[in-house]
Image: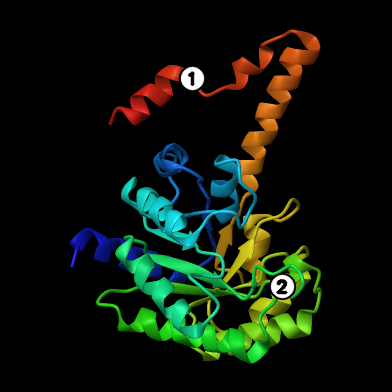
Amino acid sequence: MDKDLIAKANAFRALHQSEGAFIIPNPWDIGTAKLLAALGFKALATTSAGFAFSRGLPDGGVGFEAMIHHCRDIAGATELPVSADLEKGKGDSAESAAETIFAADAAGLAGCSIEDHTGDLDSPIYEFSHAVERVAAAAEAARALKRDFVFTARAENFLWGRNDLDDTIRRLQAFEQAGADVLYAPGLTDIETVRTVCEAVSKPVNVLAVPGFTVAQLAQAGARRISLGSKLTTYAFGMLREAAREMLDEGRFDFSREGMPFGELQAMFSK
C-alpha cells in the first residue's frame, strides 16, 4: 500500500474530526488543482460539472471511465487529499455503487461522493429504499479497503426541484445509518436550514457554499466541510466572457491587468 496515499487518507479523515469548518475547493484540471494547493487549502474535491464544462460538455456528459481518469490526474497532481464528485457512480445498482468505491480507491482518491440523482430528468431521484441500498453497498466497500476512505452520501432533492426538507433529512439520516462518513444535501440556501440539517444527523455535514454564506456562519450552524461545486469554474468562465466582451465591444484589453502574473504561474508550474 502506498504510504503517501495512506497519509493523505488519514489527513482527510482528521480534517472532518477537527473543530470548525474547512473549505474544500473544486479545481477542474491539473493547473487549477496545483494553484489551489499552493495557496494553502488543506484538501481538494473534483467537480463533475466543472470538468464537463472544461471539455465543452454539459454536466453529466462525461462517462464514468473518463471521469475516473480525470480524478486520477487530479489526485496525482498534488500532495493534498482529493475527494471526487462521482455523480451517481458507475451505474444504478447497489453493486455498481460498491464498484465505484473500488475504482475511486484505485485512482488514489482519499474519498468520493455518490448521489441519489438518477440522471433521468423524468425521474431524477432514486426511490428511497434503493438509494439507501446503494449507500450501504458503497459504505461496505469503503470499509473493506486496506486504508481509510471518506465516503460522502448526497441527497439531491433541492437541486432537482424537490424542495422537501423532511424527505431530504430522512434520506440523510438513513444514509448515516447505512454507513456514510459524510452527509451532503446540495442546494440549501439559508443558514437556518443548514442548522436544521446538521442538527438532524451526527456525522459531518458538507454544505455547498452560496452567496451570503460565510465560513463562520456555516461553522456555527454545524457544518464541518464547505465545498464550491462548479462555482470556481463558472466564475472563471464568467471572467473570460467579460474579457471577450471588453475586446469585442470596446476594443480594449484592460482585463489583462487583473490576470495572475505570467512569471508567478511559470514559477509555480516549474516546481
The residue lying furthest to the top in this view is 251
Location of residue 174 by image quarter: bottom right
Q: Tell me the kind of residue under disc 2.
A: Pro
Relative to 101, does residue 180 appear above or below in the rendering?
below
Q: Residue at x 27, y 74 (%)?
A: 147
Label 1: state its secondary structure.
Answer: loop
Dot 2 or dot 1: first in sequence order is 2
Q: Whole-percent x and y of residue 64?
A: 47, 61
Above or below residue 204? Residue 246 is above
Residue on which disc 2 sits: 124
- Where disc 2 sits, the SS reads loop
259 versus 226 height, above or below? above
Q: State which quadrant residue 265 falls in.
A: top left
Q: Position of residue 239 (x, y in %)?
A: 67, 30
Between marks 2 and 1, how big is the CA–CA gap? 44 Å
Callout 1 amino acid: Pro
In the image, residue 259 lies at what x, y percent? 57, 22
Q: Residues within 10 Å of mark 2 (few under 14, many from 20)?
A: some
Residue 8 is drawn in which quadrant? Answer: bottom left
Q: Could one spot residue 180 in this view of the protein?
A: yes
Residue 214 x %, y %: 67, 55
Q: Which residue is mark 1?
A: 261
Front label number (2 vs 1)? 2
How many discs mark residues in the rendered view? Answer: 2
Which labelled disc corresponds to residue 191?
Answer: none
Q: What residue is shown at x 32% (from left), y 74% (from top)?
A: 148
Kindly tell me whether residue 201 is visible in this rendering.
no
- As rendered, which of 14 and 79 lies closer to the eye? 79
Tag 2 near tag 1, CB within 8 Å: no
